[in-house]
Image: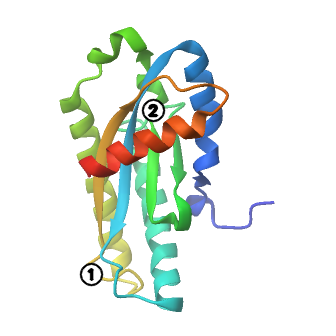
Amino acid sequence: RERRHLPSRIADLRGLAPSLRELGEQGRSVPLLYMEITGLDGLRGAKRRAALRACKKAIATALTASAGSVLRRGDVVAAGPGATWFAALLVGRAVEAAAQTLVADPDLVVAAMRLRGSVLEAFRAAQSHGVIPRRAGVRAGWTVVEPVDPSAPMTGLRHALRGAAVVA
């Protein structure tokens, strides 16, 4: 049973597998937004863990605030290992693989920057509590995930995440 505060509940990457499997079976491409926490390099031990927890909670708050604008019903968000980065699978914007060119990079740039702005705003609000350092930030990137092999959706996801991280 989940005991964490509701806004800090973000699934790990396995939470994306069912959607990826279904999209792969349908032969659909899907946009993916990527966010990576920055500025925590100098923190160690308990301070780093506390900062990451606070950042994750702030990101969850920003994601909730983005529902209906950047994020749509059916979109899926997951946290990477150690919750140092996050991925949002924009299922509501999935298209047939042949129509992938309809997913415009400028639209994804706008979505990624709006989401990044929401996260930074949530960081600033949480920084008054002193747990998130002032130098903390977030990088945003994007890509379009090609239809993945439904039997191995995480393999396709790893390739897409590398591409989105490079853009970030």
Quarter of the image with the N terminus is: bottom right
Residue found at x 27% / y 81%: 134
Mark sitting earlier along the chain (2/1): 2
Pointer 1 residue: 134
At label 1, the amino acid type is Arg
At label 2, the amino acid type is Arg
Tell whether 133 sits left or right of 6: left
Residue found at x 67% / y 67%: 4
Residue found at x 37% / y 9%: 98
Q: Position of residue 97 (x, y in %)?
A: 41, 14
Residue 76 vs 103, above or below: the answer is below
Tell whether 26 sits left or right of 136: right
Secondary structure, mark 1, is loop
Residue 41 vs 22, above or below: the answer is below
Residue 54 vs 32, above or below: the answer is below
Give whichever of 145, 83 is nearer the camera: 145
Q: Which mark is residue 72?
A: 2
Q: Residue furthest left?
A: 106
Secondary structure, mark 2, is loop
Q: Residue furthest right?
A: 1
Tell whether 161 sits left or right of 81: left
